Image (cartoon, rainbow, N blue to C red):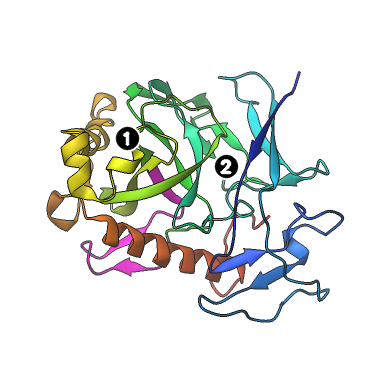
Amino acid sequence: MATVRVLAVSNSSCLLSKTTSFLAKQRPYRNSLCFTKRGGAAPSLSRRSLTCRAIYNPEVQIKEKGLPETLDYRVFFVDRSGQKVSPWHDIPLRTGDGAFNFVVEIPKESRAKMEVATDEPNTPIKQDTKKGKLRYYPYNINWNYGLLPQTWEDPSLANSEVDGAFGDNDPVDVVEIGETRRKVGEILKVKPLAALAMIDEGELDWKIVAISLDDPKASLVNDIDDVEKHFPGTLTAIRNWFRDYKIPDGKPANKFGLGNKPANKDYALKVITETNESWAKLVKRSIPAGELPLV
């Protein structure tokens, strides 16, 4: 039986905002694109000339289908009207107060490798598989893990600052270091603190280190140095965890660019901006989408 959870998400504007079915009786995203530029508005590019309107505190319901830890299990996101929406494309990136929305895929202290299904319509969260079998990490991940919506690591773009590595064709990952164990599909407002440039089998796979704004220590940490002060050893632990987690399966350790060190908040914000721009090109189809559904 499907279960339902209700979550609140806030938004003001982002590089590419969308008139979605969060707004009553409007058609879903694929029929209505609304582009805005930072610092000024641009006219709607909707095929049907729908008005561009900001979304404020829409309610998103989480509907689970199937049983956890089965091949059929999916976590769908639906709007107030009951229409499915994409946690990747339809949840806004920015919240309007300098923070960002973060979609939880894997709760801390768990092993099931959950991820947004970027190759399925509406991109629900599912457990990853390999050769028809469910995937698990060899040991628990110690932080909440998930994605920044409306970002994309372009596999056709070589990053000259990170050994010329190409993007991994996924949204940007977030490692949330707060004390609370979150739920699959939960949407948090976070602030970025640092960035790690992981290189996984030659592909660039950014890890943005962030903290939820409702965490008791959130007011104490605003940049990389604060993380070292109030969460000593955490950045090293995150790097080492992602470096080594494939070794028990007989694979080599992952590598890291940028001198094997985490970058600061400003660099993390740069990564977010650039990958949001790449996502905007993807959904405008100025970059081939391949098998990625854009709804």
The image position of residue 85, as x and y in percent, is 70, 47
* Residue 163 covered by magenta stretch: yes
> Which image quarter: residue 219?
top left
* Residue 19 covered by magenta stretch: no
The image position of residue 3, as x and y in percent, is 72, 23
Residue 117's disc number: 2
Q: Which residue is mark 1?
A: 217
Point out the stretch of residues depicted in magenta.
154-174
Q: Which residue is drawn at the image coordinates 75% and 44% (left, top)?
A: 79
Question: From where the camera sits, is residue 253 visible?
Answer: no
Q: Amino acid at mark 1?
A: Lys
For residue 71, above or below residue 188: above
Q: Residue furthest right?
A: 25
Distance between the Cα atoms at labels 2 and 1?
32 Å
> Which image quarter: residue 239?
top left
Q: Which residue is drawn at the image coordinates 28% and 44% (left, top)?
A: 221
Q: Amino acid at mark 2?
A: Ala
